[in-house]
Image (cartoon, coloured by chain):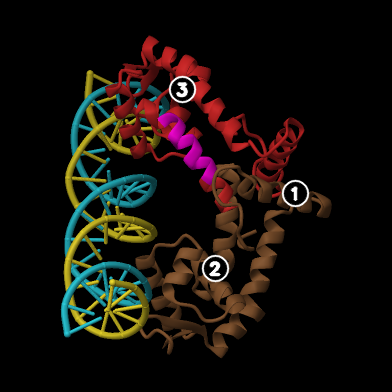
Chain colours: A brown, B red, C yellow, D cyan
DNA sequence: GCCTGTCAATCAGTGAAGCTGACGATTTAT
DNA sequence: ATAAATCGTCAGCTTCACTGATTGACAGGC
């Protein structure tokens, strides 16, 4: 299990590394692209990242010009972290395809049917537990 | 995937934590129990642990009286790290059962058939790749 | 018997990564 | 208006593994 995850992480990491990104960056970019501008807290808590770590993640993305900090007019304590047009373009046309490639690479030993099966099993393994919340939206593969 | 692994690690970690152990300790203890006394290098390289990290792992296990350092008579540079009788007893009668429980807990969402299926898929995912070596012995679940 | 090279274990120091706790700025509640 | 809570930030701490160097032990050439 841990070995599989190590491979997974390493494959994804080297997929985004050419763009100067880490996998956390990809998660954040994707979250903004699909859910719209969000505060750092939202981005952090939704994806299990620490709030203080989020600062440096956004710092990096902003430095790369992929993201911009705007104040949320409804609550000026919060930012509204949004993608720049370059950020959106890079994410959609370059990074996302690279990630799909990487995922394909990771699942290389499997046939299409097996991929779906594995995905379903993994999903159940994570979300189908009695104790805590089993309601969550789509995230990592 | 990463979420599943996080759960896995956390469940295993809290399974051995009551004994004052970390998962690395369990790996090492099991390795010695099944393969016999070994040098620290062997233990380290076999399981992807750094050699210098191994020092402190064995330190801890020795401090708990579960393991003892003896010199390898054939090569006195090396240790022959062996289980004490307490170590072996604790591992076999307490820790290993706790780990099985934890694994059972982890796989709770699955039926017996699904467990076997998932295990097989995971195994293939890790070892059935064209590039590097696909020969390895049994390790983590 | 030595001299050189290699390997096992150890240790100090380094560096990455995340987290805690505190702070200013702002919002919300009483 | 005052108090409590929230967002982003930063300094400092902890954890963890790794690098490089040191000591003791083996192996081979001569």
Label for residue A109?
Answer: 1
Camera-nearest residue between D17 and C12: D17
Label 1 Cα crowd, 10 Å radius (few <14 / some 14-19 / many 20+): some
Residue, disc 3? B95
Chain letter belonging to callout 3:
B
Which residue is painted at 69% across and 65% down in the image?
A: A101
Start and end of the magenta stretch?
Answer: B7-16
Which residue is painted at 55% across and 84% down in the image?
A: A87
Which residue is painted at 59% across and 78% down in the image?
A: A33
Asked whether the beta carbons under mark 1 and mark 3 sit within 8 Å of each other, the answer is no
Could you tell me which quadrant the C terminus of chain B lies in?
top right
Q: Alpha-carbon distance for marks 3 and 2? A: 37 Å
Percent across and percent down for residue C20 are 27, 55
Camera-nearest residue between A34 and B126: A34
State whether discs 2 and 1 lie on one chain.
yes
**Comparing marks 2 and 1, which lies closer to the viewer?**
2
Which residue is painted at 56% across and 26% down in the image?
A: B100
Q: In the picture provided, is A113 more to the left or to the right than A104?
A: right
Determine the residue located farthest toward the top in the rendered image: B85
């Amino acid at each position: 299990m841990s070995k599989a995850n190590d491979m997974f992480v390493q494959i994804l990491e080297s997929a985004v590394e050419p763009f100067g990104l880490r996998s956390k960056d990809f998660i954040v970019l994707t979250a903004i692209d699909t859910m719209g501008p969000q505060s750092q807290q939202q981005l952090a808590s939704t994806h299990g990242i620490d709030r203080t770590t989020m600062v440096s993640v956004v710092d990096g993305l902003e430095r790369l010009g992929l993201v911009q900090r705007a104040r949320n007019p409804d609550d000026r304590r919060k930012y509204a972290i949004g993608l720049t047009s370059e950020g959106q373009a890079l994410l959609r046309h370059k990074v996302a395809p690279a990630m799909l490639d990487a995922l394909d690479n990771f699942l290389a030993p499997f046939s299409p049917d097996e991929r779906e099966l594995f995905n379903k099993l993994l999903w159940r393994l994570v979300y189908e537990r009695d104790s805590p919340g089993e309601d969550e939206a789509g995230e990592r593969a």
